[in-house]
Image (tube, helix red, strand yellow):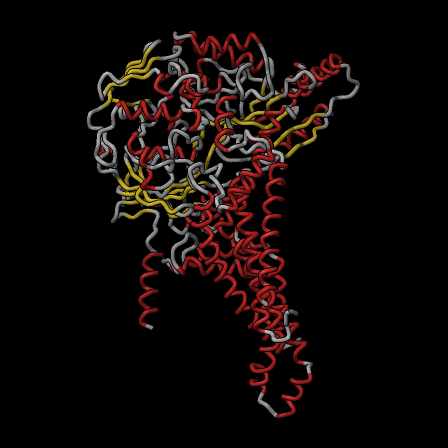
Amino acid sequence: MLVLHYASSSLTGAVTDVSAVDVERNSISILIREEPPQLDSSRATDAISGMVLGHVMEGLVRMGMDGRLEGAVAKDWEVTPTTATFWLREDAKWSDGRPVTAADFIFSWQTALKPETGSEYAFLLFAIKNAEAINTGTLPPSALGLSAPDTNTLVIDLERPVPFFDKMLVFPTFYPIREDFYAATEGRFGADADQLLYNGPFQITRWVHGSSMTFERNPHYWNLEEIHLDAIHVPFITSDATASLNFFKDRKISMTGLQAENLTEAMRMGWQIRQHRDGTVFYIDFNFRDDRATDNLNLRRAIQAALDMEEMVYKVTKLPGYEPGVSLFPGWLMGEKDLLRREYPPTKISPNASSAQAYLQAAMQELGLDEPPDLVLLSGDNPISSVQSEWVQQSLKTTLGISIKIDKQIFKQRLAKMTAGDFDMVLAGWGPDYNDPLTFGDLYASWNKNNRGEYNSPELDALIDTAQNQLEPAARMRAFGDIQQHLIENAVLLPMYERGVTYVVDPRIKQLKRRVIGPDPDWSRAYIDAGSE
Amino acid sequence: MLRYFAKRIVLGLVTIWFIASATFFGMHAVPGDPLAGDKAMTAQIRANLEAKYGLDQPLGTQYLIYLGNIAQGDFGISYTQENRRVNDIIREHFPISATLGILAIVFAGLGGVLWGALTALYRNRWPDVVIMFLVILGISVPSFVVAAISQWSLVGANLAAGTTILPIGGWGTVWHMLVPALVLGLSTMAYLTRLMRSSMLEVVSTDYIRTAKAKGLPATQIFSRHQLRNAILPVVTVLGPAIAGITTGGFVVEIVFAIPGLGRYFVQAIQQLDYTVIMGTTVFYGAFLVFMVILVDLVYGLIDPRVRVEK
């Protein structure tokens, strides 16, 4: 009996341990959707790994709280058309107290490029001299265009001028890795909490796979002044949105996303509902292969004129925070001085049934058809894609008499079919890799592997070439404006919406940063204000 | 006896080989590309990845390499969690599923015998009607609904109490296991209740019960000594496969209650076409099921002397 009593009391202690905000211990608890698949920064590609790595690692530069690029391990830098030079701060340290040096970046980037690493994002490094040749195995990693005149200076030789090179460096692929530590992990680098060396504001002190993680303040971080929390706990890992909401209600986690059906309840609870546009654009892609009807411009224009994206966003999906799509370039991208969207507003195509009909007649004549063609719409298998594809099917049937066959596939199979060109139209989306319009701008280049409909236009290729190589900002942005105009005029894609997320945060937490580029959500600078409940 | 079990074990190994081969070829026949991600890869990066996973070899060679590795107990490295070995995934997460499963079986077994005996005892009276109605509910309501409702109710209870009566999810202590185990065992409990009920009713009309009554034994003694003991045998028979079923079928419960069990990996691997994890978990679960069936045969022979193996 005594034993039982003892056991139950010690267990009870563990149960109440988790709380959304622990003022006494200066810590918070959060939930993540899935186990971070990859904490080896040279190989990480997904958002969850990026979010975790963003709290425990630091690159040369980072996105500041004001959304601007700021120095991190580098205190200063200079980018010219041929080289980039970074001066590292002396007080940047690893979690074992040793300094972060230029050699750690050189080793990390060489590792990402080695063919046997199999890094999917190695292409981000291709701006550096010889990078691509190393990735194909024709040159040894030591040939990479990097040098360290002293331990705190990193000089990068560029393969070609990249106007936004410094902005790319916020991506995890560019984080440093220390060679001796990497070698000592014997192929298990990043597999466990003790198989990683940290140089960011926090370090992972506990990681039970699939279950929980703890990030504690890294005492060796150079900028501890900005770091207020002592610990961030991740007591739950689950993809179930309802469970997440329940954990929030139970005051076990400090933030949860909201679904459309939870909004009324959230308002009744008096929660302060927040919105964040996550930077991703969703659109309908066409297949431009010669045997496809969608290769015909008038047919695409007919579909463009028939679909009312505002109706889809506001009346069909009705998801909070979503905005009807008007361009491949989302609204948050910066142009030369102001938002790109203000500097180069996209031409608005208003839905118009009669002009859609006229385009369809012209298309049928060109294609030699008596009836409107039947088309295959490839779609994902999630509820949102299902509703959207049915809406497209219905709209095109009523306005144009086009019959759509919906081909619903799981993620991997949809990608395989897109790559094989087995579709007429497909619901697709694109999220940014770096903070420059080019991350969207080169999608329809004839050489881009993500151009799965194989759109091929010398005119567009020339514009993209300008956007890639022109160093003068005004001329570059003009090229993006022209790309946007080309895509709309030729109905190369039909932007559907920009995605938003709706969420609630424990009111005691301040300075939580949501971002489009870089780790999101970013809790690293957050603090607890106990008085503001 | 020994020879019989040696034969069973050899047959079991053949079954596992068959499972492994069928899974291997079935998996490769499923359309979709395990290496595909949101962003397209350059031909070189793709070739590097294919070489890393041995996908550049012909299918026959891949199969032989894979069989050789399995024979040595090595399931390879996960495609989605690139620096975790599948062996580690099974080793770390199966015990959690197993713990939860055993607790669920205990709930299901105790509950099933108790409710089943009660319904038989009160046949066609109100306890029977009420319990059988709940049994039908337990069998027909899918576990994701039960899981969601019970979690939602727990949140309400905790809010009303102003403190944590029971955690609504996560893993770590016995308290975390109670509700998920109940939810997981519910449909098995319902099934066992029905089985126990019909088995009890069959026993009631047997001669030895009539004899016992005629001898003038008290009703409680008839119930516990004669009726229950004889009626419980069919329940024991189905428990074996039920244990295997429950310890492997906890995917939904694991997602809702944020439990790091193997069931999640088993299902998600298929969605993500994570070849090595699909192979590892399927072969592991297959072997586990084969083992449980052999074990039940063995136990059954011990419990019931009528079951004898011919030499």
Where A174 sits versus A256, above or below? above
Residue appearing at x 32%, y 47% in the figure: A21
Residue A62 visible (yes or no): yes
Percent x, y of residue A34: 45, 41
Residue at the extreme left: A90
* Residue B57 image offset from top left, x and y in percent: 56, 30
Quadrant (top left/top right/bottom left/bottom right) for the C terminus of chain B? bottom right
Position of residue A215 measured from the top left corner of the image (x, y, whole percent): 31, 41
Query: For this rendering, which residue is in front, A511 or A238?
Result: A238
Q: Does any portion of residue B241 appear in the rendered image?
A: no
**Quadrant assignment, res A401:** top right
Residue sitting nearer the eye, B268 or B53:
B53
Q: Position of residue A468 (x, y in %)?
A: 44, 11
Task: State which quadrant residue A45 falls in.
Answer: top left
Image point 49% across, 15% down: which residue?
A345
Q: Could you tell me how many numbered marks the image carries?
A: 0
- Residue name at image x 24 percent, y 22 percent: A88
Is residue B262 shown left or right of residue A392? Answer: left
| Res. B154 image quadrant | bottom left
